[in-house]
Image (tube, rainbow, N blue to C red):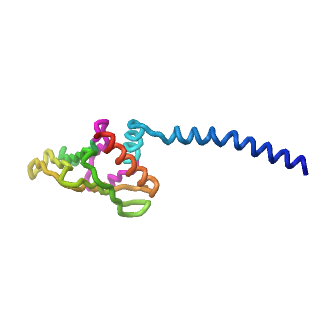
Amino acid sequence: MTGSLIIKRKWVIALLAIIPICAFKYVQGSKMGEQDWLDWSNKCLNQCYDPSNEAKLVKWELSITPDHYLRLRKTFPHERQEYFSLQLQRFSYLDYSGTDASGTLEFKADTDDIIVQTYNDPKGDIDSTTSRLELPVKNMQPERLDSLRAALMFLKSAGL
């Protein structure tokens, strides 16, 4: 019995020595800086955006820029383009409807602060604003959605 008790004590001592090291590494790893949030947000948005729901979409560019703008450019046949831009200081809320497999992200601004522009449109080039931007997405698990919300709120406050 005393031999197994000694082994148990050694395990307890080893665990007590390892726990502070693991906790320190966890805290250090969880302290993401602005560039980390930018990189993660861009990776998340580009992996989740589902352009297959956009009829005749030829090319798209989606990013959050270092100066805290969410930008989306869609290019259709005949070089017709739609461009959306939201300064994250004007961002107010991120909503999601759908399942883990597919759905729609909705970026909201308090007022009509999302710039919408069209280029090379047969109906004419249009400049307007809106308070909502909807993005079709895939593979949006709740944890990823929560993390994206946290990233956007961090970037919004970092831009102040």
The percent position of residue 62, horizontal first and vertical second, equals: 31, 44
Q: Which residues are magenta?
A: 47-68
The percent position of residue 73, horizontal first and vertical second, equals: 25, 45
Apparent side of residue 17 relative to residue 46 in the rendered image (left or right): right
The image quadrant where one finds the C terminus is top left
Residue at 24% x, 46% y: name it.
86
The one of 134 and 32 positioned closer to us in this rendering: 32
State which quadrant residue 11 falls in. top right
The percent position of residue 124, horizontal first and vertical second, equals: 8, 49
The one of 136 and 3 positioned closer to us in this rendering: 3
Residue at 28% x, 53% y: name it.
92
Q: Residue furthest bottom?
A: 98
What count of labels does the image hold?
Answer: 0
Q: Is residue 59 visible?
A: no
Residue at 10% x, 47% y: name it.
125
Apparent side of residue 128 relative to residue 40 in the rendered image (left or right): left
Apparent side of residue 120 relative to residue 39 in the rendered image (left or right): left
Q: Decide whether residue 48 is among the magenta residues.
A: yes
In the rendered view, tell whether residue 100 sits above or below residue 18: below
The percent position of residue 118, horizontal first and vertical second, equals: 15, 48
Q: Is residue 14 visible?
A: yes
Q: Residue furthest left?
A: 124
Q: Decide whether residue 60 is among the magenta residues.
A: yes
Residue at 29% x, 43% y: name it.
61
